[in-house]
Structures are given as C-alpha cells and as structure tokens.
Amino acid sequence: MQNDLFRTMDRRECLRLLAEVPVGRVVYTRHALPAVLPVNFVLDADSSVLLRTSAGSDLLRAVDGVVVAFEADEFDAASHCGWSVVVTGPANVVTDPAEHERMLRSGPQSWMPIQDDVFIRIESAMVTGRELTALRGTD
C-alpha cells in the first residue's frame, strides 16, 4: 500500500528548506554511542552546513574528520504536516585562515557564548528529505 501522505523531496528542494530554518541537530558518535546535539547553523555557498563552536568543545573533538548526519525540520502539530531534511557527509574543522575570517563575518553566529571560534563544515555528500502532507478529506 502506497502512503500518499509522504513525499520524497529532491536535493534542490531540501537545500532550499534547510536554508530557511536557524536550528538543526548534528548526529554523531560519542563514547561509541549515538549522540544528538541541537545547534544553530547556516548553509554555505557550496551547500555545506556550517557550525560555529569553541576550540575546546566536545563536539569539535567528536566530529572532526568523521562522517556525521545533520537534520533539520519544521512541523505543524495542529495540521500534522511538515518536512525533514538530512545531510550526511564528512565534518571537518575549517583551517584555512582566509575562510575562517570570511566565516567570522558571514558565518553562523552561535547562540551560546564561545571562546576561540572554530567553524565546522559538514559536506553535503548526501541530502535526503521527506514532506508529510496533511490528511485531506477525512473526518
């Protein structure tokens, strides 16, 4: 049986929606267990997800150089509709001084107080998304 309530979205639509929300969740491994951390972010011109953290953060140590997932969504509980996008790819610390300076000016602004700004880039190697549409015509 086909479920007409779910619609798979293409990469372009996923990235467009992702650019419209300020918060997502980075999914990574911490002490051999799955971990999820809500973070604010921006999409860079190359469709990478950019995060800003402190040089000594646990997140930085856990994700630098490994493949992670990043998820963002938007749902309306009243209408039971919304969307979810997942970006999967390698996460790396931005080490290029010129890129770092550019991101200080135009990159994500952390909602948390941080010291020694470090930027993490999650490459959008795989982008998937689904939309849940409201159930129509039922009472």
Image (tube, rainbow, N blue to C red):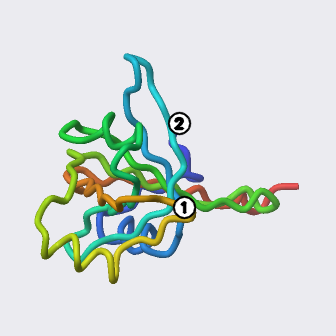
Q: Nearer the viewer, residue 54 or 29?
A: 54
The residue under label 2 is 1
2 and 1 marks in contact (CB < 8 Å): no
Q: Nearer the viewer, residue 15 or 94?
A: 94
Question: Which percent across, then down, holds residue 80?
Answer: 73, 56
Taking the image as shown, residue 113 lies to the left or right of residue 59, namely right
Q: Which residue is mark 1?
A: 113
User: Is disc 2 placed on a helix, strand or loop?
Assistant: loop
Whichever of callouts 2 and 1 sits on the residue coming sooner in the sequence is 2
Residue extending farthest right: 139
Mark 1 surroundings within 10 Å by alpha-carbon count, few (fewer than 14), some (14 through 19), many (20 or more): few
The location of residue 16, given as percent across then percent down, is 39, 74
The residue lying at 29 percent from left, 46 percent from top is 88
Give the vertical position of 64 relative to 74 (above or below). Answer: above
Look at 40% across and 55% down and name the residue there.
Answer: 53
> Which dot marks residue 66?
none
Amino acid type shown at disc 1: Pro
Residue 115 appears left or right of 3: left
The residue that appears at 11% across and 65% down in the rendered structure is: 96
Give amino acid for label 2.
Answer: Met
Between 115 and 19, the one lying in front of the other is: 115
Q: Position of residue 74 (x, y in %)?
A: 60, 62
The reply, left or right, for residue 92 in relation to residue 112 is left
Q: Could you give the CA–CA distance between mark 2 and mark 1, rounded to whole angstroms?
A: 50 Å
